[in-house]
Amino acid sequence: MGVTAVVLGGGLAGMLVASVLAERGPVVVVERDRYPAEAVERKGVPQAHHGHLLLPGGVRRLDALLPGLVDELLARGAQRLGLPEDVVSLSAQGWAPRFPAVQHALSCSRALLDHAVRTRVLADERISVRTGTDAEELRGDAARVGGVLVRDRETRRAAELPAELVVDATGRGSRTPRWLTALGVPPVPEERVDPGLAYATRLFRAPEDAPEHFPNVSVQASPGTGRPGRAGVLFPIEDRRWLITLSGTRGGEPPADADGFAAFARALPHPVLGELIARADPLGPVRGYRNTANHRRRYERTRLPSGFLVVGDAVGSTNPTYGQGMSVTAAQVVALRDALREHGGDTRRVQRAITAQGRTSWSAAAGQDVLYPEVLGRRPGRADVLRHRFGRRLERAGARDPEVFARLLRGHTLTGSPAAVLHPRVLRALLRDAPARSSAEPPFTEAERAVLGNLEEDRT
């Protein structure tokens, strides 16, 4: 039987796409890397060393695509974080209250997540993979794509892979705009908002006295102040380890050396992450990353050739500090599956369904980042400023009222429409607009606070 689909890119997006396309026939995944046998970082995923959070919307969709996967990840040590109960977070509004959990996110290493997904997907006999292979060009014309030319990276031998459907899931470095131009397709409209964000991450072993279920701890950046945004977050992951990621926009980038990393954490609006770093044992060097601009390609405004789709970061990617990338990708793959079932071979309609899943995430991320100084791509307008002020009022309302917070969370975690904030209870809370009472110190439990030992007492 011939190949029904070729998926370009064998990362998280590519694996998820292959899993849904297999119901239509044989699938070949083309991946330039060689896969490691164990759950370790690989060269083709440079951001894998950094913190990742699978939002509740992503958790639900991932489990719908690969039933049982979430339970497997939890069994292998992934941390289930109740929102907001298991989050200690400082914003411009103060420390967020830890209301009882209304949703749950998942925190684990990217290596564990990718390995678990890849193992499940490649167990399907309808799916094969060609590793160590580059995709070089599309075969077809401006009306229809019928395959792809690939080349083995070691032997340099080229091969044609004909297919009814080709899907680009190669991520931020996608070459699709160039390939389409070669076929005679007009240039793809693109948008970019780049606040110059850089981030640095270091892996630590949690202190022996730290509770096994430690919260996610974050000190958030504040856009709109005229100063670079600086932030930090602790991700509890498997095997009693912490990934601590520090970030800063242009002019406020974190250092990539151990001493500078720790000093940057202590200099944030609250030194809690620096204090936790002082108690933990480092398990590796500080790793930096800078490919973080908000960037989207408007394929829904392009007359794509039939038989071709684009998904994941190859469509659009947002500032990773907002933590929505993997969850948006899972939503896009669910949309791809459902649209193919409904529209069959009408790939233009399918692409519109895919693209629609990233609009809310783009608006939120780009609308925030445009407020930082020296941003590239576009300047902030009055609408951006008003949206930011409205968001601040919503945060204040959510800090006072658990039900209001739950409604806000639906939009942030991709589990519901942002329109949920238009509920009468939310509107009444907005009219009051009084700041919630917030402690000067992180709202840790007694066991969590004990991890800081005398450091907190010395500071006070």
Image: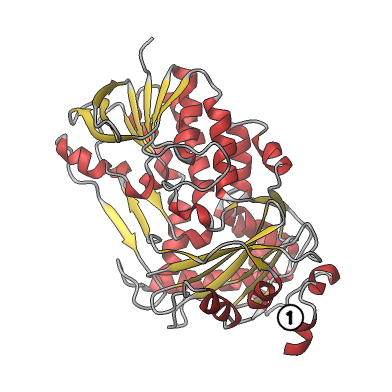
Vertically, is 6 above or below 279? above
Residue at 28% x, 27% y: name it: 306
Residue 4 x/y as whole percent: 38, 18
Q: Give the SS element for disc 1.
A: loop
Callout 1 environment at 10 Å: few (<14), some (14 to 19), or many (20+)? few
Q: Would residue 423 be seen by someone viewing this image from the given angle?
A: no
Which residue is more in the foreground, 80 or 305?
80
Q: Residue furthest top?
A: 1
Q: Residue furthest right?
A: 446
Colour option used: secondary structure
Q: Would residue 80 be seen by someone viewing this image from the given angle?
A: yes
The reply, left or right, for residue 62 in relation to residue 272 is: left
Which residue is more in the foreground, 60 or 326?
326
Residue 61 x/y as whole percent: 59, 39
Residue 121 x/y as whole percent: 54, 29
Tell me the residue that label 1 is attached to.
441
Q: How many marks?
A: 1
Residue 398 quadrant: bottom right
Residue 183 x/y as whole percent: 16, 34
Vertically, is 140 above or below 319? above
Residue 65 quadrant: top right
Kind of residue at badge 1: Glu
Residue at 32% x, 72% y: name it: 379
Vertically, is 142 above or below 247? above
Q: Residue furthest front?
A: 155
The reply, left or right, for residue 265 in relation to residue 84 is: left
Q: Which quarter of the rendering shows the C terminus?
A: bottom right
Residue at 41% x, 63% y: name it: 366
Residue 279 quadrant: bottom right
The reply, left or right, for residue 425 in relation to residue 312 is: right
Which residue is more in the foreground, 37 or 452?
37
